Image: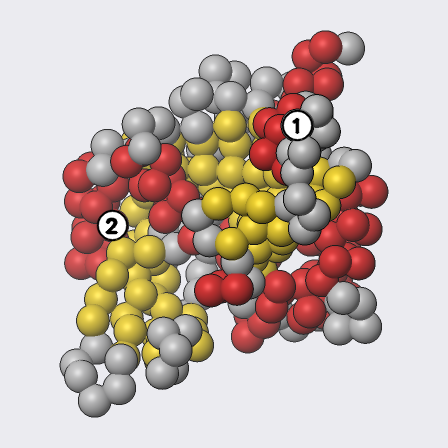
Amino acid sequence: MNPTVIGEALVDVLAPGISPPQEFVGGSPLNVAVSLARLGYPGTLVSRWGQDEKGRTIEQHLAENQVKFLGGADDKPTVIAHGVLDPAGGATFAFNAFWQMPTLVTELDPGSQLVHTGSIATLFSPAELLPLITRARQHATISYDPNLRPSLVSNHAQTVAEVEQFVAVADVVRVSGIDLRWLYPMRSVKQTARAWLELGPAMVVSTAGSAGSFGWCAPEPWNSSPGWWRSPTPWAPGTRSPRRCCAGSPTTADRRRAA
């Protein structure tokens, strides 16, 4: 599969209350790249970090997980996300955010069959990322996770428009219900997910923490609990189960190759 993941690598500094803060290598895109490698699909992370101690920690973490990278250390500091945990385990973050598309990356590996992006990278570098992702659609399935950080947003309407541009070039979109309600406070999560399907992706999945997730792939919606999928109505042999709907729905990359 040779996945390529584009986005931020950072260090989370989490304060769980009265205990001393703890540091973890993170960043939504980095976590995707590491998770894919641990599942047996090592690939490449396109990212940046600083020439500092935290940047070296990121490089070590990637090496330990067999994730290659393009970009790497530059003359800006590594992004730090200061998080405060609530009693339920959720975190509120404040960032010293800086992210830019590494200038050496003008095209993605044509052998990459999966390209994932999202979060701070798509917020800070949409003009560089959108053309790159659009060209990659010819050889790869595109996945996108907005993973929004409202504290970094200065123009709500502009952010909505940019998010929709990324949705339109993606095959699979994962988004939290919190993000959808922030983007479209006057619409329900289901209304927005269905509207996004109209933009082009083969699948939209909205997560809701311990409450599970809701996913839509044309033409049927389904509901899941963590770890397994279940239909809102009993499934009978001979009908399309939600799992079969998911597995049988071609991505736009599949449809382009078949054209």
Q: Nearer the viewer, mark 1 or mark 2?
A: 1
Q: Residue 144: give x, y in percent of width and height.
A: 58, 44
Q: Is residue 107 above or below residue 229?
A: above
Q: Nearer the viewer, residue 73 or 172?
A: 172
- Observer-nearest residue: 60 or 31? 31
Q: Which mark is residue 174?
A: none
Q: Secondary structure at mark 1?
A: loop
| 200 sits left or right of 234 in the view | right
Name the one closer to the observer, 258 or 221.
Answer: 221
The answer, for residue 171, to whether it is visible in the render is no
Cβ atoms at labels 1 and 2 below 8 Å apart: no
Three-letter amino acid code of the residue under disc 2: Ile
Residue at left offset 20%, top offset 71%: 22
Q: Is residue 216 left or right of residue 213?
A: right
- Distance (Cα) linking label 1 and label 2: 49 Å
Q: Secondary structure at mark 2?
A: helix
Question: Vertical placement of 215 versus 87: above or below?
Answer: above
User: Which residue does the numbered mark 1 point to in the structure image?
Assistant: 237
In the image, farthest residue toward the top: 258
Q: In which quadrant is the N terminus drawn?
A: top left
Q: Residues within 10 Å of mark 2 (few under 14, many from 20)?
A: many
Percent from the top left, x then y, of residue 9?
36, 52
**Residue 44 showing in the rendered view:** yes
Residue designated by label 2: 58
Q: Residue at x 45, y 31 (%)?
A: 4
In which quadrant is the C terminus drawn?
top right
| Residue kind at label 1, given as amino acid type | Pro
Residue 49: x %, y % from top left: 33, 52
Could you tell which of marks 1 and 2 lies nearer the N-terminus? Answer: 2
Q: Position of residue 133 (x, y in %)?
A: 61, 33
